[in-house]
Amino acid sequence: MDDLREKYLKAIADVADEAGLEDLRVQALGKKGEISLQMRELGKMTPEQRQVAGPALNALKNEVNSALAARKAALGDAALNERLRGEWLDVTLPARHRRQGTIHPVSQVTEEVTAIFADMGFAVAEGPQIETDWYNFDALNIPGHHPARAEMDTFYTHRKEGDNRPPHVLRTHTSPVQIRYMEQHGTPCRVIAPGRVYRADYDQTHTPMFHQVEGLAIDKDISMANLKWVLEEFFSAYFGAKVRTRFRASHFPFTEPSAEVDIQCSWEGGTVKVGEGDDWLEVLGSGMVHPHVLRSAGVDPDQWQGFAFGMGIDRIAMLKYGIPDLRAFFDSDLRWLRHYGFSALDVPAVHSGV
Ligand code: 2NL
């Protein structure tokens, strides 16, 4: 019995893994294990012999069992330690960089412009980008022979062979939104219409799709003086209080009289800076809404009058943020944005709405 004890305690101490340990358990204490067989022999003994051998065998069995359990725990700890060494992780390493999205400057400027006009009581309207030629041209007093209506300048859709109705166009300005707004809401009204517009042009200062905001105010006695105040208010809110503006007589089919607005700027080293210097930059067209246009929108020009204006959003975004090439805005690679200081969720506070 001492031999068995020595044999198993040594084997258990030497075993290298849990599978070997299980083999030893079966060898010693399994159904046909060496110690189990010896215990079965107890039945054949005399009571005297059994009184001595029984407790001794039981003690041996308990001792081997405890040794198995202790060794099993030790092997488990060793395996865990081994895993911990292998799967080591440095939680103090800096986090992996994740690229963040940014608000596009055109979207940001659209929000800013909208907020400034909202503060002055203008509603915001949207409308279709594919328009009838009535809403895009005729209603705006743009005659059939006007160059804007030539295929060179405007994107037209196709009609089926034999369908002689005039084709739809990709709107060339957001004025149609304002015609629709007047028809639906009647007078008096104050509204701006920001959105995408399309013209067949592509160079450093023109892209076939760009963004425009138009404004319209109709009431009994709205005048050019109101137009001038609203626009000066807008430019000082958008570019800064010190920017100077200049109104020049101009011509548009949809306004009479008409004026273009320039803002003060400087040209140095090929870059424009707004609000300083002795140069002027054209940024906006405007005027008193032509009576024909009012009538087209169902408004009586003998009762009502008002001003309208239109400007390019991309253009004023370039000027404010010093971006030289309009095409960059619509490039799919926007890494250049960071160069101009646009970072994720870095949005200036907008004016509260009215
Ligand atoms: C420009 C010129 C302008 C308008 C747009 C307008 C709209 C209606 C009636 C009359 Cl519903 N006029 N819009 C008026 C004058 C000029 O835009 O050069 N924009 C960049």
Image (cartoon, rainbow, N blue to C red):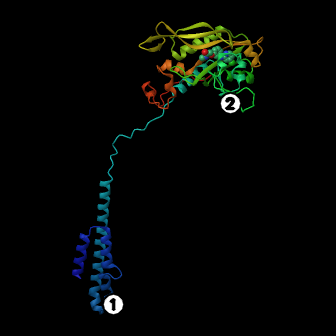
Quadrant for the N terminus in the image: bottom left
Residue 348 visible in the snapshot = no
Task: Examine the rendered structure and indicate whether residue 112 appears above or below residue 254.
Answer: below
Earlier-in-chain disc, 2 versus 1: 1
Q: Which residue is mark 2?
A: 158
Give the amino acid type for the residue marked by disc 2 in the picture: His
Give percent across and percent down for residue 76. 32, 63
- Callout 2: few (<14), some (14-19), or many (20+) C-alpha neighbours within 10 Å? few
In percent of the image, x 40 and y 38: which residue is there? 97
Q: Is residue 289 above or below residue 62?
A: above
Q: Which numbered disc, 2 or 1, marks the residue closer to the eye?
A: 2
Q: Quadrant of residue 5?
A: bottom left
Identify which residue, 161 or 279, lies in the foreground: 161
Local secondary structure at mark 1: helix
Against 156, residue 238 (above or below) is above
Residue 44 appears anywhere in the view: yes
Q: Which residue is mark 1?
A: 43
Identity, as a three-letter code, of the amino acid under mark 1 = Gly
Q: Position of residue 67 (x, y in %)?
A: 28, 72
The dot on residue 175 is: none
The residue located at (32%, 68%) in the rendering is: 18
Q: Which corner quadrant holds the C terminus? A: top right
Give ligand 1's quarter of the image: top right
Task: Residue at 32%, 92% (x, y): give it.
Answer: 44
The residue at label 1 has a CB less than 8 Å from ligand 1: no
Quarter holding residue 229? top right
Given the current orientation, which residue lies at the most extreme front position? Answer: 161
**Horizontal placement of 349 versus 288: left or right?**
left
